[in-house]
Amino acid sequence: MRRPLSRGGARPPVFPSTATDRSGMTWGLRIHTWLKGELVGEDADGNRYYRSRHSPIGHAEKRWVIFNGTNEASRVPPEWHAWLHHTTDDPIKTPPRPWMKPHVPNPTGGPGAYLPQGHDARGGRRARATGDYEAWKPE
């Protein structure tokens, strides 16, 4: 069945399931969250956590997060990670400890990635082996 034409004669745009809005949500996720989701809470970064309103008997409720900004799983705090994976029923907010550090995104694959000496991106040269190395020779 063809979609009706709009007033101007052109068909309205189609938003495939992979099209995202400015928050990074797909239209399918936005509709699913609106129809079936229940907001549980929000973390300090602004990530919002949802669970399904109704779950089939014998099945665990579905839980998901909608990120505030880029979709990076390492941005989920430990208490919410435990809740998402059904380890706890209530996310427990713990006060920050002196040894806790703020989140730093994973630099792998980016300009801040660790490259050891001898890596191709650093010229491909490394220090020569010293006298403590003895090459293996098959007998």
Image (cartoon, rainbow, N blue to C red):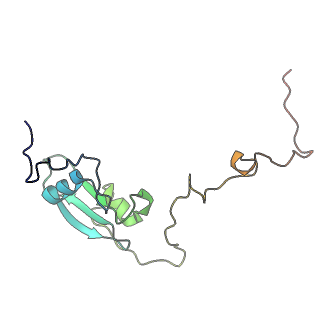
Q: Residue at x 35, y 64 (%)?
A: 80
In the depicted view, which residue is nearer to us: 14 or 81? 14
Q: Residue at x 38, y 71 (%)?
A: 45
**Is residue 21 depicted above or below 42 in this figure?**
above
- For the question of whether residue 27 can be seen, the reply is yes
Q: Residue furthest right?
A: 131
Q: Residue at x 71, y 47 (%)?
A: 119
From the top left corner, tell me how far across and down residue 87 is, in percent.
33, 57
Give the quarter of the figure containing the C terminus.
Answer: top right
Left or right of 56, for residue 44: right
Left or right of 53, for residue 24: right
In the depicted view, which residue is nearer to us: 85 or 110? 110
Q: Residue furthest top?
A: 139
From the top left corner, tell me how far across and down residue 46 is, in percent.
34, 71
Image quadrant where residue 95 sits: bottom left
Left or right of 138, for residue 93: left
Give the quarter of the figure containing the N terminus.
Answer: top left
Q: Residue at x 50, y 72 (%)?
A: 102
Left or right of 52, for residue 5: left
**Is residue 27 depicted above or below 97 in this figure?**
above
From the top left corner, tell me how far across and down residue 40 is, in percent.
23, 67
From the top left corner, tell me how far across and down residue 38 is, in percent.
18, 63
- For the question of whether residue 53 can be seen, the reply is no
Circle count: 0
In the depicted view, which residue is nearer to us: 91 or 107? 107
